[in-house]
Amino acid sequence: MQINRRKFLHYSALVTSSLALGGIPLYAYNAEAGPGDRDEVKRSYCGLCHPRCGTLLHMKNGRVIEVSGDPDHPVTRGLICERGLLMAEHIHHPDRINYPLKRVGARGEGKWERISWDQALDEVAGKLARLRDEFGPETLGFTHGTSRTHHWDCRRFYNLFGSPNVCGANNICMCPSYATEFATYGGMARGNARQAKCLVIWGRASANSSPIQAWPGVQAASRQGATIIVVDPREIDEVALADMWLQIRPGTDLALMLGWIRLIIEEDLYDKDFVENWTVGFDELRDAVREYTPEKVSEITWVPVEQITAAARIYATSKPAQLPYAYGLDKQGVNSNQCARARAILRAITGNLEIQGGETFGQTPEVARVRGEFDLVAAEAIGPEQRAKQLGADTYPFFGFPGWERNLANNQKLPKGQVNPPSMYRTCVAHARDVFQAAITKKPYPITAMFSVASNPMLSFPDPKMVFDALSALELYVVMEYYMTPSAALADYVFPSATTVEQPELWVTGGFCMACPPGIEPLFERKDTYQFYRGLGLRLGQEDQWPWETLEQACDFRLEPTGLTFRQLTEQYGFFGTPEFKRYEQSGFGTPSGKVELYSAIFEELGNDPLPKYKEPLWSPLGDPELVAEFPLILITGSRFMPMYHSEQRQIESARKQVPDPLVLLHPDTAAKQGLENDQWVFVVSPRGRARMRLRTSTRIHPRMVDAQHGWWFPERQEALPELFGVFESNINMLCPMEPEFCSPEIGSWPFSALMCRIEKA
Ligand SMILES: Nc1nc2c(c(=O)[nH]1)N[C@H]1C(S)=C(S)[C@@H](COP(=O)(O)OP(=O)(O)OC[C@H]3O[C@@H](n4cnc5c(=O)[nH]c(N)nc54)[C@H](O)[C@@H]3O)O[C@H]1N2
Ligand SMILES: Nc1nc2c(c(=O)[nH]1)N[C@H]1C(S)=C(S)[C@@H](COP(=O)(O)OP(=O)(O)OC[C@H]3O[C@@H](n4cnc5c(=O)[nH]c(N)nc54)[C@H](O)[C@@H]3O)O[C@H]1N2
Ligand code: SF4
Ligand SMILES: [Mo]
């Protein structure tokens, strides 16, 4: 069958008409086969975002001409999304970096020389060794993005090298929740939406952010009659499936959660058996939430009292109910970790933890046999002296070594394999602000070198000017990339990265382990990240530490306890485990008390509030009246839209045809009051800076709120400074602050939502 172009065009038309939400509703796309004139089909996978969907590569004369979903893949069953369809364009894109590059002009001048891998690795290793001798290994920083590469190879290299200064998106993405749930009940809990009777979609818009992994589950739950509650400032696609939509004021979710907890306790709707036997701190919790009456919560959140109470009652009385992880809560700065705490508490007191259809730790005995991050990162190689130098860990010990070590110690009390140990990648990181500042000010010690692999810090962190100053101040900046980005353009060396379809991967979740086969050999001189770290490691005194010559051999090592090789597993795609429930009845929870810590001992020990308490964000419509007069609108940034992934796909022609310009969403009444019209160029302005964007008017957003896309730069513009691909023009992070008073006190989560702005004509 030909890829169904008519279907695709139909969807594209729909897509354009619904740009109103600043995003694109996504339709899982099932193409059984590619074009008729292919001469070969190869099985592979997509890694353009998280779920590693199974794909078929349709080949002609050695080129991938089309990609379709692999109908035999046991997890994704032939589904791929619109972005996955762009893979062929991405593999062969003329802008791809195919050889190591060395800067020859001034930094950011856009002048490069092609060199060999050996020369590039020799030179980088040589410079690093000199900097290490002069300043100590902690002088090497790292920025990471969201999970696209293996990550364990990176952390292994850093641990062996002796630097604790790996930093990145993890302070704001998923990991605040992950670490907090470890402290609360010893693991991160997730559910299968298909089994829920009630689904609370609280700050997540999976139709656009997770079209293949989460969205089909939401649709299935809806078809099966689950009650769906949406808590979101925007009328997202999910609202069409929902029984109730709470249009909350951004940043106030914690108050609403505490209101729910109060009501659930007051009305005796909690699971008494579970609370009595398996939690600590219930009385303290009851006291702590007493002030959050429905009336007070309504005032804070702008959600009507009747909705607050009705939604809480439905959630507490429909078992099994799920309250899944959502980035809309992680990205709100000050309250983000305590939101994660309150969500964990809600799951626990309603008895929805570790039951079928509720939220479980998911690790199955079968999958636990596969060697994971903990077995690979050589954590013991970095000793107490270097651990103590981690930047930011004095302010945010919970997210550095001290918190990780505590979560790990509690995890190790459980039978081996019951819950995976807390990931270093996710919960043991330096704070990006401190790392950038140490590059600029050289205090408390100088960061002189940095790597960015699979991350584009000029677009992903707040305050791109600070990021620019930091990267510009480095003596050595090394990037591994697909394309020349605004960050890569500031590097001394850029290494060419293999596409996912050019490298093997083991995709392991608690419930399954899939072997993802490379469909093609790496083109040109692209390599996987393992070759990069190993190549450096071998040159930096780590000769005994990289025994596997290739990534595939490392995968074999990981699979050894299962008795299978990577190739063998590929033939059967992978394997599944059998979930178990209520394992705490035998072993307790992996926490200091062995119970769910409604009152968190780890938070308390590390100087954080052991019970959640709502804080009004510093910039707020209820705050400083002068600020509100100047910046009257509440700003949300970065709501996901297809087909883009963060700052990516801006050079992919078919993606840019769909979304050519940066968009900002505003209610038509608010626009009319200011004499603004749909489609015109505007500036979104905050006390920190501005971004030029195209206005979309829509009633799907509250009249006092603004929703601006993130990740915008323009590959079609000049690379050389001062242009730097227009990175300072429409980059919404120009508006976002990162100082401590805007961040969560537990781990320093900075805000990408719940900010204040105004809109001006451009
Ligand atoms: N304003 C605002 N900012 C945000 C957010 C928001 O909501 N609002 N969201 C934040 C979140 S949740 C996250 S996770 C971060 C994401 O931050 P990043 O992960 O840094 O974002 P990307 O733009 O995807 O940058 C990844 C870069 O790595 C390259 N790349 C992709 N895959 C690979 C690979 O396999 N190997 C190598 N070597 N390179 C690869 C891509 O070309 C791209 O340039 O952004 C954060 N920034
Ligand atoms: N297309 C696409 N998909 C992606 C990505 C991408 O860049 N593009 N990035 C991936 C990554 S790294 C991540 S982390 C996930 C995130 O995916 P999601 O968890 O879906 O997160 P977002 O789309 O950032 O925001 C979700 C919702 O939060 C709402 N929101 C914003 N502020 C608040 C608030 O204060 N309270 C509440 N209740 N809601 C709020 C927004 O209106 C939005 O509808 O997406 C992943 N998927
Ligand atoms: S959801 Fe789309 S982009 Fe993500 S891995 Fe699957 S096909 Fe690729
Ligand atoms: Mo993320």
Image: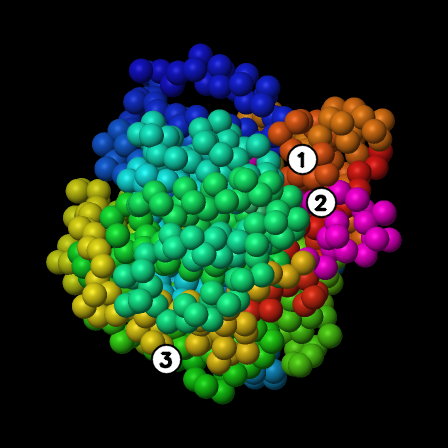
Circles 2 and 3, Cβ within 8 Å, touching? The answer is no
Main SS class of the magenta portion in the image = loop
- Judge from the rendering whether residue 273 lies leftward or rightward of residue 383; answer left or right: left
Query: Which residue does the image show at 40% across and 28% down from the upper left?
Result: 28
Residue 317 in the image, given as x and y percentages of width and height: 36, 45
Q: Which residues are magenta?
A: 617-645
**Mark 2 in CB contact with mark 1 (< 8 angstroms):** yes
Q: Secondary structure at mark 2?
A: strand
> 142 left or right of 413?
right
Disc 2 versus disc 3: nearer the observer: 2
Among the 4 quarters of the image, the one containing residue 94 = top right
Mark 3, other Cα within 10 Å: few <14 / some 14–19 / many ≥20: few
Q: Position of residue 271 (x, y in %)?
A: 32, 56
| The C terminus, quarter of image | top right
Q: CA distance from mark 1 to mark 3?
A: 51 Å
- Amino acid tagged 1: His
Q: Upstream in the sequence, badge 2 or badge 3?
A: 3
Locate residue 4, reporting x and y percent: 39, 16
> Which disc number belongs to residue 380?
3
Secondary structure at badge 3 equals helix
Residue 526: x and y in percent read 45, 49
> CA gap, disc 2 to disc 1?
9 Å
Q: Which residue is mark 2?
A: 634
Task: Reply above or below: 386 against 195.
Answer: below
Total numbered circles: 3
Query: Which residue bears the numbered disc 1?
Result: 702
Q: For the residue carrying disc 1, how many other residues have a C-alpha within 10 Å: few (<14), some (14-19), or many (20+)?
A: many
- Residue at image location 22% in from the left, 55% down from the top: 581
